[in-house]
Each structure stands twice: as structure tokens, then as C-alpha cells.
């Protein structure tokens, strides 16, 4: 009986991994992770740039479509601008790094309704040639202006035409 028990114990002890095998596995895993991390950082940067671009295009399209579909008061507009810290009005500067917002304003410049607010994307900035863009009830943009969406060293230029349409590239 004892010999049977001791042979089972020996087989159980022989079934595991040795310390050397575990160390080699960890070393190989560490090398693979070290090689792979820089490519993941590039993936994250591209993801941030795509999100910033998508948010910006969505904001322009929403502002234009809301201006066309809403029954705006005489002289009323739908405005796309950089949001203030509270997210209740435009900030008034052309940096556009604090997030975007679309709001409805009357002819006197009073905010009637905040339509949508976008939080800023980490490490992203939108540089604009104006403090805000107003869309009239026919969808026209005032002023027609260029924008640059950047994340780190990556940059994408957009041009907003007077008709309210937007395209990738520098304004002529």
C-alpha cells in the first residue's frame, strides 16, 4: 500500500511546471508585451482623433439640420460653438478645446434652448477661425470658416462652406 501511495505522490509532483519553465514563459510574455505596447498607443491616438473628428462632424450636421427643421423665431439661429464650463452657453473664444455645443438663439443673442453638449475629447482640440457658427433656417452657415481638429501631432482640416456643407481639407 505504501509503495502505491508514494508512486501517486511522485506522479502528482511531476505533473506541474518547473520554476525554470515558468521564468522562461514570463520572459517571453514580457518581450511580447514590450513590443506590442507602442502599437497600442498609436491605436489609442488614432481612436481619439477619429472620435474628435466624428464629434465635430456630428455637431456641424446636427446644428445645420436643427436650423432647418426647427421653427426658428424671426432672426433666430442655431449656433455651434465652444461650450462654457457649465455647458449652458458659448465660451466666446475661438480655441474650442472645452467641448462643443449646439444651441438655439433668438435675434437678440439670448439662448432659447441648449440642444446638445459634447464633452471634450482627451488631448483633442478644435481650432476655429471664429467664435461660433450660426446656421439660419435655410441651413446656411455664417461665417463660412475653416476648422482644424487635432490630437497630439495628428491634424485634420475641415472647411465649412456658406451653404452649410462641410468637407475635409483647407478652405480655398
Image (cartoon, helix red, strand yellow):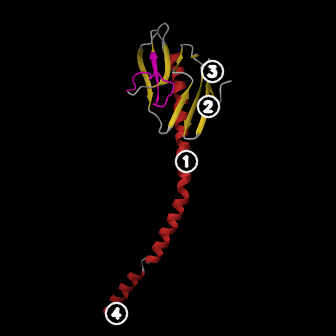
Is residue 56 toward the left or the right of residue 7 in the image? right
Count residues near mark 1 (Cα–Cα under 10 Å), then give few for <14, some for 14-19, many for 20+: few
Q: Which residues are magenta?
A: 86-104
Q: Earlier in the sequence, mark 3 or mark 1?
A: 1
In-image side of 119 versus 56 (left or right) = left
Marks 2/3: CA distance?
13 Å
Question: Residue 94, percent across and down?
Answer: 51, 25
Q: Distance from label 1 to label 2 (Cα)?
A: 21 Å
From where the camera sits, is residue 58 visible? yes
Report the disc number at residue 157: 2
Q: Which residue is mark 1?
A: 43
Residue 120 spot, x, y in % from top left: 46, 34
Magenta stretch: dominant secondary structure:
loop
Quadrant (top left, top right, bottom left, bottom right) of the C terminus: top right
Residue at point 50%, 64% (across, down): 30
Tell me: residue 112, above or below residue 11: above
Q: CA distance from mark 4 to mark 3?
A: 90 Å
Amino acid at each position: 500500500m505504501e509503495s502505491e501511495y508514494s508512486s501517486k505522490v511522485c506522479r502528482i509532483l511531476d505533473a506541474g511546471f518547473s520554476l525554470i519553465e515558468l521564468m522562461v514563459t514570463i520572459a517571453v510574455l514580457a518581450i511580447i508585451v514590450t513590443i506590442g505596447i507602442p502599437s497600442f498607443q498609436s491605436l489609442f491616438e488614432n481612436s481619439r482623433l477619429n472620435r474628435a473628428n466624428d464629434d465635430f462632424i456630428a455637431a456641424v450636421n446636427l446644428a445645420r439640420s436643427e436650423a432647418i427643421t426647427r421653427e426658428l423665431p424671426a432672426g433666430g439661429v442655431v449656433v455651434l460653438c465652444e461650450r462654457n464650463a457649465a455647458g449652458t452657453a458659448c465660451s466666446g473664444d475661438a480655441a474650442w478645446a472645452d467641448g462643443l455645443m449646439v444651441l438655439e438663439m433668438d435675434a437678440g443673442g439670448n439662448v432659447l434652448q441648449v440642444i446638445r453638449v459634447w464633452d471634450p475629447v482627451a488631448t483633442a482640440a478644435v481650432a476655429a477661425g471664429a467664435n461660433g457658427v450660426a446656421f439660419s433656417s435655410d441651413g446656411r452657415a455664417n461665417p463660412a470658416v475653416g476648422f482644424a481638429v487635432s490630437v497630439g501631432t495628428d491634424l485634420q482640416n475641415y472647411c465649412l462652406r456658406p451653404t452649410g456643407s462641410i468637407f475635409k481639407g483647407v478652405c480655398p
